[in-house]
Image: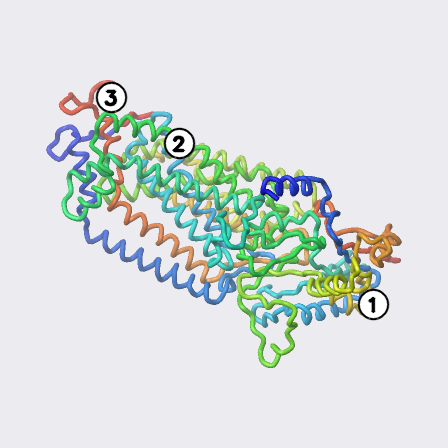
Amino acid sequence: MSLVEQWRKSWEKYSKPGYYDEFDYAWTMSIDLDKCTGCEACVTACQAENNLPIVGEEDFSRGREIKWIRIERYWVGEYPNIKLGFIPMLCQHCDAAPCETVCPVSATYHNQDGLNTQIYNRCIGTRACAVYCPYEVRYFNFTTYHWDAPLEQQLNPDVTVREKGVMEKCTFCIQRIRQAKDRAKDDGRRRVRDGEVQPACVQTCPSQALVFGDRKDPDSQVSQMIAMEKSRAYRVLEALNTSPSVVYLKKVDDDAS
Amino acid sequence: MQAKVNPVGEPLQYADVNRDVIRSLTQTGRRYYIALATAFGLTIVCFFFPWFYQLYYGLGAAGMNHPGVWGTYLANFIFWIGLSHSGTLLSCVLHLTNSTWRKAMYRSAEAMTLFSLMVAATFVMVHVGRPWFIHWALPYSNQMELWPNFRSPLLFDVMAIATYLTGSSIFIYMGSIPDFAAARDRTAGWRHHMYVLLSMGWRGTDKEWHRLGWAYTFLAVLIIPLAVSVHSIVSWDFAMSLVPALHQTIFAPYFVVGAIYSGTAGIVTVMFVLRKSMNFEQYITEVHFDNLGKLLLALSLMWTYINIVELFTGWYSGTSAEHEALKFKLFGYYALLYWEMILFCAVAPLLLISTRFRTSLVPMLILSIAINIGMYTERFLIVATSLSRQYLPDAWGLYVPSLVEISILVGSLAMFVTLFLLFVKIFPSVSMYEVKETMGAPGREFPEKGTELWPKTQ
């Protein structure tokens, strides 16, 4: 195939609006805030699964902690009718991600699974993606963090350990997705079955507030959940037109009205 | 206007111009060496040592944190790009409008452009997390078969700066060729050999002058839109983001005006120093300061207007995020800096309305330095206040520069001074042939009507 022909084909493919839907999978997470207890088990699970560095006391106090998923806390209302609200915040894997357009070296891009991926080896550390991300879920390695012995023994061999000067963020546990896809391919199956792959946070959530699956499969648990709870479903900062892949289900608050 | 006379008391002749300017190249006093040694030493100690430490440790050596991932390095980058903006641009505009007062000052103004651009380019390296891979941002064919991301404003930036650096270095070099030739003819030793190479065999024939004039005007026309586009593109790094206080269409003109503003103030500073240290009183006169003062006044009014527009659009948007960002900017943690900037860049320059102020050199020097301090603050605030207050309140934070960052800023100033000090000994820092053009042919009565040197108003 000649180069011009290749370009023509890519142009035809990518100039269509909504070409992301042509992707193999559209991984989606739904977070039911009614079920979420804010226990931070997901945060810990993520830390263990993805080799997140423990930045230490000094860097933590400077606001350099790395948490791919975090529980954000908000005070709602005025004293005495004050309440603590919380919401888990992770990379929203936006279909129209602002971080992807700004990276000068394409270290972050949209892959065939509708995931917003980060290539650590390609990253030169301009940190522009972190500025462009309205959800503030991109984390920078301000130095090379080390694990004291014997902690390095518990590093996950499937996940890269990042060095200084590299941006990182939630991957929806891409290593698990890759494994599931490989298994599916080896079995001669065409698609990954629903529930076959779960990110660490979803797997750990004690109240099962987090549900993960393929949006393209209408029978998947996550599609069913979003369809069923349509009145509660929303996406954070939807007005910015980033088209996130994480759907939140509103908390039903009896005292609110 | 003070009379232009040579030491014997006769009107200034061609030979006097040559003598005065080439003396600045060949005669080097002890003060120059002390200044050069200090500047070079400061560059090494304040810029390179902390930077090497940062390369070893990682960007954690700077004060950046999670909402504030951009810090003073980016502010420095914009500041130096801004400072670069006036030299070549001003020189081009004045060349095309045939302003005679430009001729004595444009060479040093252009050098300022060149060196501040170089310092700015260094800050790209200081700013990124892994500068050893910075070449990946350049489009070159490689074994990875990967191109940079052409949608990225940061990539536009790399292109724009590379183009501007190339354009302005060709411009300053080409404009200096006849002067290199003059220096070649009047120097001996290694200097002579250097100028033989630099003057590229210039003989001063009609054909050569014609070609030089044509090419010079061509480049001047080319560089004006280039200079405007460079800072517009730098502003897009910010304006194309979704950050509440940054996502504004006014940013491109805001940055361009701000750049020319700080650049013009920088020229005033540099001219003052040149005039004092090299005894160029005959060539750089009050007229220059007067004219630059008028330009500064106009720019300060434009800058103030754009600042008001920026505040207004923030308020008019009616969104809570924009309002919060606005409130934080005006009354938040960095408020003192904001009002300092307003004082230095919007209020103080109103003094320029008086001719007496514009023609008094020391007040002009103080004002020009104040303006650049204010403009640096502006760049810092653009980065710091906006990133501190973004959409999610949980991710709000503060950014305070570390000692390493402050040291690198000081070191970058020293680096600029070092480069400039080297420049004044290699390039004739006043354009000899263009000054001569304003003097009329030798032997003629001076001053002759119509060929008045440095007319009062231009």
Respond whether the residues carrying marks 2 and 3 are from the same subunit: yes
Residue B279 x, y percent position in the rendering: 22, 41
Structural distance between the alpha carbons of marks 2 and 3:
24 Å
Pointer 1 and pointer 3: residues touching (CB < 8 Å)? no
Up-down relation of residue B121 to residue B349 (above or below): below
Mark 3 residue crowding within 10 angstroms, few (<14) / some (14–19) / many (20+): few
Residue B131 x, y percent position in the rendering: 47, 57
Q: Which residue is mark 2?
A: B294
Q: Secondary structure at mark 1?
A: loop
Q: Secondary structure at mark 3?
A: loop
Which tag is nearer the camera, tag 2 or tag 1? 1
Q: Which residue is mark 1?
A: A207
Three-letter amino acid code of the residue under disc 3: Thr
Structural distance between the alpha carbons of marks 2 and 1:
70 Å
Is residue A212 something that shows in the picture?
no
- The answer to which of B363 and A247 lies nearer the viewer is A247
